Amino acid sequence: MRRLFALIPLAALAVLAVFFWNGLGRDPREVPSVLINRPVPEFQLAGPPGQSSGLSSADLKGRVSLVSLFGSWCVSCLQEHPTLMMIRQGGELPIFGLDWRDDPVKGAEWLARNGNPYEKIGLDPAPGRVSIDFGVTGAPESFLVDRNGVIRYKQIGPITPEIWQHTLLPIVRELQK
């Protein structure tokens, strides 16, 4: 009986080792979202200066779309921007922008300087209520939304041409069927 009790700490240590090993082997950029396969949170945001309308959750229904969170202050967003321009030129799907925690004038100037890949843009000033509802952890983040307004994929970090071609585009094509 004493031998059995002596094995309990060893068994507990083995179980902990398995959990640590499993956790250390995961990609820290892959943070699961509780919103996957759930409807986009309801929202209605004003647009930037010079844009007649903003962005609402209703805009994300009826076709597969990409919602991209950005800010003029975000270095990684600038890195991602040429890929978003390429996606827009390809015409595979509309891209909608969430200008997160940004000065509206600076955001509009940033888009004027770098090009605007977005069909519509919504301003989500600090604290970023809509971004919080989306479960955003940082910028840039993007969400693939199906034609029913359901979030199907979350991309944390910049979309690169490789991520577009090998990860996002196959999902888009499957959702468009």
Image (cartoon, rainbow, N blue to C red):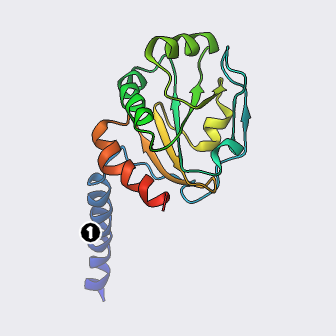
Locate residue 41, reporting x and y percent: 68, 47
Locate residue 80, reporting x and y percent: 38, 28
Q: Is residue 67 left or right of residue 17?
A: right
- Element type at marker 1? helix
Q: Which quadrant does the N terminus fall into?
A: bottom left
Q: Residue at x 45, y 39 (%)?
A: 91
Q: Is residue 167 left or right of residue 174?
A: left
Exactly how many numbered labels are in the figure?
1
Q: Residue at x 65, y 23 (%)?
A: 125
Q: Nearer the viewer, residue 137 or 167?
A: 167
Q: Nearer the viewer, residue 76 or 173?
A: 173
Hey, which residue is sitting farthest bottom in the picture?
1
Q: Is residue 81 above or below residue 10?
A: above
Q: Residues within 10 Å of mark 1 (few under 14, many from 20)?
A: few
Q: Residue at x 28, y 65 (%)?
A: 18
Which residue lies under the disc numbered 1? 14
Q: Is residue 97 left or right of residue 80?
A: right
Q: Is residue 101 above or below residue 106?
A: below
Q: Residue at x 56, y 60 (%)?
A: 37
Q: Is residue 31 left or right of residue 101?
A: left
Locate residue 173, reporting x and y percent: 42, 56
Q: Is residue 157 above or below residue 108?
A: below
Three-letter code, disc 1:
Ala
Locate residue 139, reporting x and y percent: 47, 30
